[in-house]
Amino acid sequence: MPATSFDKESIKNTIIGKVQRYNGLTIEEATPQQIYRAVASTVRDQIMQKYMVAREDRKKCRQKRLYYLSVEYLMGRSMYCNMLNLVSTKEYTEALAELGIDIRDVLKEEPEPGLGNGGLGRLAACFLDSLSSLDLPAMGCTIRYEYGLFRQKIVDGQQVELPDSWLDNGNAWETPVMEDTCEVHFGGHVEEMTVNGRQQYITRDYYTVEAVPYDMPIVGYDTTNVNPLRMWSARSPKKLDLGSFGEGKYVQASEEIELAEAISKVLYPEDKHYEGKMLRLKQHYFFTSATLQYILKDFKKMYGSDLRKLPDKVVIHINDTHPGMAVPELMRLLIDQEGLEWDEAAQIVRRTIAYTNHTIMAEALEKWPVSMVQQLLPRIWQIINELNRRLCDRLWNQFPGDWDRIARMAIVSYDNVHMANMCIAMSYSVNGVSRLHGEILKEETFYDYNLVMPEKFSAITNGITHRRWLLSCNPGLTGLIRDTIGDKWIREPELLSELRPYADDAAFREAFAKVKLQNKERLAAMLRERQGVDVDPSFMFDVQAKRLHEYKRQMLNALHILVLYNRIADDPNFTMQPRVFFFGAKASPGYYRAKQIIRFICAISELIEKHPRARTMLKVVFLENYDVSSAEILIPAAEVSEQLSTASKEASGTGNMKFMMNGAVTIGTMDGANVEISEQVGMDNIYIFGMRSDTVRDMYREHSYNPMNIFETNQELRKAMTQMIDGTLFPTNGAVLQDLYHSLLMGEWGSLGDNYFVLKDFGSYSMAQRRLNNDYENRDKWLKMAVTNTAMSGIFSSDRTIEEYNEKIWHLQKTVR
Ligand code: 26Q
């Protein structure tokens, strides 16, 4: 094995040399960005050595390979995790220190690739880390958006969106792979003809977009295994020629180029809200087609031209339905390019593709207007139509006359292509992301499919990489755990449970509390620097950080804070544990109500600041631009984790796991993975409140819920809600939150309002908060709970998740060397 770990001296010399060669400068003269680039390049050299070994291993072992397709990969910064996985953090930290550089200043220079919205994208990133660390052969595939998720600023208590141009200084980790550039075709029309007795389909008058791949190496923890993340960038095949300039066609030519390149320009900021936008469909097909072309090319190079062996050597996993065009695209390539018959091709597809569902929210289930698919992808449309015809034939035989059922299960119905139905019908595995979510998929969302093909359905609970979400982001706690139980848990995170007995060890608890306090101070310093806000680290730190959505119920939290404020303001004798409530949340720019909720939170924050006594016990901080990097500071500082989704709505949640692992205690509903968290820690170490998911589903079915009944009986809640519109929060304009207020009390389409049961669950939430507040006063009791949470979090490592996917779905062999 080649020497891949650098010692301190060689790291120092390499960095000095690179700054000299790249910039012609000494270390003292170089800017922080120049130093960052030199260090990144040094780390990359080390990874590239391993990458070469990994590619040789792959050629030798000829194992099956996983392609994980996702329109989002929320990677976060790479430098520190790469050092960690190279087991070189100490060497780099010391080498830089000897050059007079604080490693933290270097790390800050890295722009964060925010190529995702939230949970689904971050899950894909955790999966890559675990795949590499577990020596499994895989390639991540996505779009190389020039602009990631918008950067958020709060101006006058409102969200303002700014573009995220993360590529301005280049991306230190990627390499273009020009030789794998391929063409993706759009539009045109299909001509049918018979050639040598076989029906052929040729598309004419299409336009071409080139797909250029950029690979980012993902190194595993203490292994030579490196897997690429392949990011496809769109490029026009047209080059600006000066001739056309003279003919006055310059503008037209440059417009065409821009249209092609628009495909990978920007990530859509909508999370769980479907809109049939042409450009989005182009994005999805663009990266899926490029990926599939590459998969077949690589397969043929490695294993020859017998594509019937594809399912033995390739598994294509689609992260939700967004890459679902992989189904008809693989059919197209197998039939039109490789000359297979329909049935053969369909069988290969059904043995190669696996699908994960991430949401049951009806408005997020992807469907595309037939007219759009027809126009943009005429051959793909033919294939989808034929898939649908054959599926409906089969269903008709099985359920003669049952039109309703067939319409629910059809790929094409009511002039739309239903992506989930296509993915279920044409894949060999459909999985949910927590036990509860898996059950709901079978019992409700995909009830009919589960009846017909129950063997496909499973549930695999999500996970998070403990390397980023504990080792890297919480060095204090990592050090304490190492000193206490050694470091076997780093490879086998479930061994964190060896910490459990230490919950009863007073000295350990104090050490644990000391680490938490340091992390709170670190967060306080960041807030002072970034937002000019002062928080007192002796307050309890309570955090709700996730995308802004009505179903996640930031409203429940906000209304409760307003109730606490009123208790203080109305009763001079009222006291409580001083607490800071942190919110981190981006709202989709077009989601009016979500933006109103941000205004509500910011207005409560101001109201409290104006009250001299409330201010001594209560504070609300809206953390701007919540992203992976700020999560890495925020989560280790949290003592309370707010997981408030309406039961049945949050498929899993993964933030809940990150908080737990870092010793925060959860207050939450029995939803998604909260259910399994409560089983791990036991009901004494979590605050569960609210309706259970079966009750929620019954209430929806019965249309019987009327929030007005609660509004009329709960005085505290009524007062807080009234303050939304009576000028308390917005003295000059009482109407600001009118719509939000009304949404809680008045409904539309058969609902009587409050679609997510905020009022219904308020009483139970408020009681749970009361218990939590009292328990926090008992320091020993609280710390025992916190320690227990960290100790029982090992099962939520994405290493466990990936092992489960591999056992149940992928069946990959670990690389041996
Ligand atoms: C699709 C088509 C058109 C427009 C938008 C979309 C779209 C985009 C993003 C639909 C859904 C998403 C994102 C979904 C998501 O992040 N789901 C979360 O996935 C996590 C990982 O499994 C779970 O933990 C969360 O519970 C779930 O909400």
Image: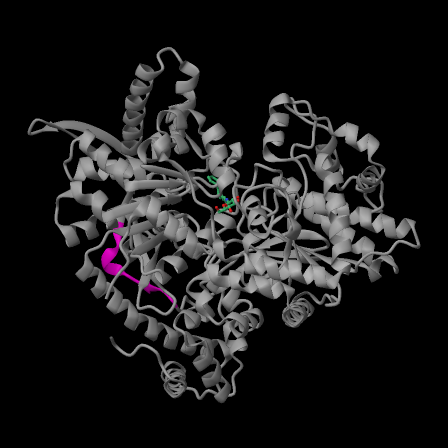
Residue 240 visible in image: no
Residue extent of the magenta highlight: 173-182
The colour scheme is one colour
Residue 500 location, quadrant: bottom right
Residue 8: image quadrant is bottom left
- Whole-percent x, y for residue 260 in the image: 36, 48
Outermost residue on the left side: it is: 196
Side (left or right) of 541 relative to 399: right
Is 657 left, or right, of 369 in this rendering? right
Pinpoint residue 429: horizontal percent, then vertical percent.
35, 38
The image quadrant where one finds the N terminus is bottom left
Depth order, front residue of 199/299: 299
The residue shown at (52%, 44%) is 652
Q: Say whether residue 808 is magenta.
A: no
Front in this rendered view, residue 225 or 630: 225
Where is 369 relative to 495, above or below?
A: above
Question: Is residue 55 toward the left or the right of residue 444 in the image?
Answer: left
In the image, what residue occupies the spot 44% across and 55% down? Answer: 798
Report the residue at 41% width, 14% height from top: 403
Establish if 316 lies above or below 800. above
**Quarter of the rendering containing residue 597:** top right
Locate residue 174, reporting x and y percent.
36, 64
Q: Residue furthest right?
A: 572
583 left or right, relative to 23: right
Residue 380, percent from left and from top: 29, 33
Residue 433 visible, this angle: yes
